Image: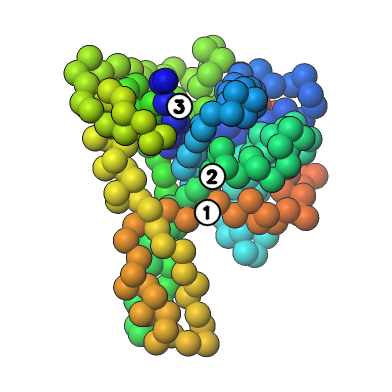
Amino acid sequence: MKPKYRSLSYPYLLPKSHSSGGDLRYQVPGCINTKVQRRVKEGRRYRVYVVTPLLPGFEGDITTGGGNALQAVMHFNYRTMIRGEHSIISQLKKEMDDQWMNYISFGGLRTHAELEDRLVTELIYVHSKMLIADDNTVIIGSANINDRSMLGKRDSEVAVIVEDSETVAAVMDEKQYQAGRYALQLRLECFRDRFYKEVGLAQGDPARARDELRKIRGFLVQFPLDFLSEENLMPSVGTKEAMVPTEIWT
């Protein structure tokens, strides 16, 4: 049986989600949902790991309400991932309730340090555009998963597709199979350096926090799917960001 596995790393993860049911132009979100639902019906394991920036790379301070461009991109990111009835997670919930968590995970990268005797943390901006599939196919290029890159008539993009011809013995889903040598090594290297033991930087107990931080070996954290979930992140009326076409953000 061919194992099914996907790992994606994109700075603009599907930032164009449909405002209405028929507004989706590229098919990546729908393909993810279709694949997951098919594997569920077949009773087969299937995992999608998505790594994307915790915040878009725009000017502004989200904590003070600044950065209209930053918030606009966040709006479409969240509309694609979890907010609205047409989002990836909302569609999966209709079929499997909270079991969607067994099939797809969203994450970002974050690091920590000690500055002037204070524990501090900062996000790591994900700028790579990469997909690893089934440990035998790799796509690395300039294209984001959005309309600007995927429609073929807006931004110019380039990518390399690597399909391994040299295989090595490996295990996936507790079964023996032949993995591509390059794809497998790349995936293992990414996982080895990225996984993060989740701990809290306890403000009231810095000594304990330092002890916990010593156990961390990586940078991956869960994406905050509920962050600002009650806020309207679209640019306010009257701002220059609100005057530009919606396609600018997609």
Q: Residue at x 37, y 80 (%)?
A: 210
Q: Which residue is mark 3?
A: 4
Q: Which is more N-terminal, label 1 or label 3?
A: 3
Q: Residue at x 63, y 51 (%)?
A: 225
Q: Which is more N-terminal, label 1 or label 2?
A: 2
Q: Secondary structure at mark 3?
A: loop
Q: Are marks 3 and 1 in contact (CB under 8 Å)?
A: no
In terms of depth relative to the viewer, which is nearer, 40 or 130? 40
Hey, which quadrant is residue 72 in on the image?
top right
What colouring does the structure picture have? rainbow
Q: Secondary structure at mark 2?
A: strand
In terms of depth relative to the viewer, which is nearer, 246 or 198? 198
Distance, label 2 to label 1, CA atoms, is 6 Å
Distance, label 3 to label 1, CA atoms, is 22 Å
Quick check: 186 left or right of 8?
left
Distance, label 3 to label 2, CA atoms, is 17 Å
Residue 247 lies, in percent from the top left, at 65, 26
In terms of depth relative to the viewer, which is nearer, 192 or 153? 192
Q: Quadrant of the N terminus?
A: top left
Residue 48 lies, in percent from the top left, at 50, 35
Crowd class of label 1 (few under 14; some 14 to 19; many from 20; radius 10 Å): some
Numbered circle sitting on residue 106: 2
Taking 97 as reference, is 152 above or below it? above
Residue 149 lies, in percent from the top left, at 51, 22
The amino acid sitting under disc 2 is Phe
Q: Secondary structure at mark 1?
A: strand
Q: Nearer the viewer, mark 3 or mark 1?
A: 3
